[in-house]
Image (cartoon, rainbow, N blue to C red):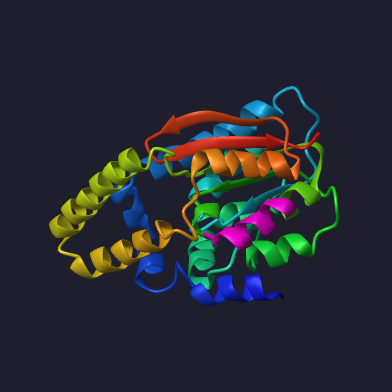
């Protein structure tokens, strides 16, 4: 494991209270569940009329919200879902136990880059992710994108529903301020100031200069790697559904 990967795995951004009560994300950020649904539906629509895929991969499955949407879209196609946080994987395993028992889902504990580097070139028909890549530092994220492109089959699809910062930094800041207000509203009503502290700290991490993923530079980075076409299919505030094909 290289230095970039070591740096990422040491951060453990979703350990502790955030991981243990991750379902609270739906209250402070309703757009997250909507994006998970959109990722699954997009994959389902893209596959319609195509040959049944052999291998589909999800990066950063968390507790399994997007995983469930992908499984619904994939019908009988097996799905491999990767996450580096054991407590999140344990919840995904409990939430999706029937799919695991049926052989439709395999959960893997690993960080994204290490897992991708261990895969053969042209291995996956579809690679999907939701609210994962924005957590990575720039250098690590760039390596992950390169590896995604390498392991995608020609004609394959990468779909990412994620936080993509506005290129208009003033408007972006205004939206983040509104997001913080929602955090305070929800956690005060729940009397969970302890969780408020953890999510505010996490948001500072998301918004740090070496981590924030802005839309235009993010699309340019994918194009430079070789993804084509690179397309924004949906955009709402700081969230976007982005896809990249492998020619």
- Against 134, residue 71 (above or below) is above
Residue at left 39%, top 38%? Answer: 168
How far from the left and from the top, in percent, is residue 177? 25, 48
Q: Is residue 105 visible?
A: no
Instruction: Using residue 79 as the reference point, say whether residue 22 is left or right of it.
Output: left
Picture coordinates of residue 219, whole percent (x, y)? 60, 39
Specify whether residue 144 is painted magenta. Answer: yes
Asked whether residue 154 is drawn in magenta, I would say no
Residue 143 drawn at (x, y percent) = 69, 58
Q: Is residue 21 shown left or right of residue 96?
A: left
Which residue is most to the top? Answer: 49
Q: Quadrant of residue 227?
A: top right
Give the tally of numbered discs: 0
Pinpoint residue 86: horizontal percent, then vertical percent: 53, 72
> Which residue is found at the position 70% from the left and 25% from the top?
48
For the residue pair 174 and 56, the one nearer the viewer reads as: 174
Q: Visible in this render: residue 191? A: yes
Q: Quadrant of the N terminus?
A: bottom right
Front one among 18 and 182: 182
In the rendered image, the quadrant that contains the C terminus is: top right
Point 67% across, 28% down: residue? 46
Give 161 or 86, whichever is nearer the viewer. Answer: 161
22 vs 56, left or right, is left
Specify the principal SS of the magenta part: helix
Residues drawn in magenta: 136-146
């Amino acid at each position: 494991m290289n230095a970039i990967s070591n740096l990422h795995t040491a951060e453990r951004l979703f350990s502790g209270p955030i991981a243990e009560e991750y379902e609270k994300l739906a209250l402070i950020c309703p757009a997250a569940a909507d994006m998970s649904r959109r990722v699954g539906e997009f994959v389902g629509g893209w596959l319609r009329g195509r040959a049944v895929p052999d291998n589909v991969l999800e990066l950063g499955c968390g507790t399994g919200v997007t995983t469930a949407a992908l499984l619904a879209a994939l019908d009988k196609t097996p799905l491999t879902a990767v996450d580096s946080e054991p407590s999140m994987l344990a919840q995904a395993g409990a939430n999706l136990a029937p799919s695991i028992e049926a052989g439709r889902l395999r959960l893997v504990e690993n960080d994204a880059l290490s897992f991708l580097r261990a895969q053969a070139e042209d291995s996956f028909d579809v690679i999907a992710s939701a609210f994962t890549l924005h957590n990575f530092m720039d250098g690590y994220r760039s390596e992950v994108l390169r590896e995604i492109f390498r392991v995608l089959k020609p004609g394959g699809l990468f779909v990412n529903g994620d936080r993509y910062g506005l290129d208009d930094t003033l408007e972006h800041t205004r939206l983040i301020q509104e997001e913080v207000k929602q955090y305070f509203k929800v956690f005060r009503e729940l009397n969970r100031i302890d969780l408020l502290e953890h999510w505010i700290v996490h948001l500072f991490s998301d918004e740090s200069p070496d981590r924030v993923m802005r839309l235009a530079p993010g699309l340019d980075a994918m194009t430079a790697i070789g993804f084509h076409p690179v397309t924004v299919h949906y955009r709402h505030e700081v969230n976007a559904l982005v896809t990249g094909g492998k020619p």
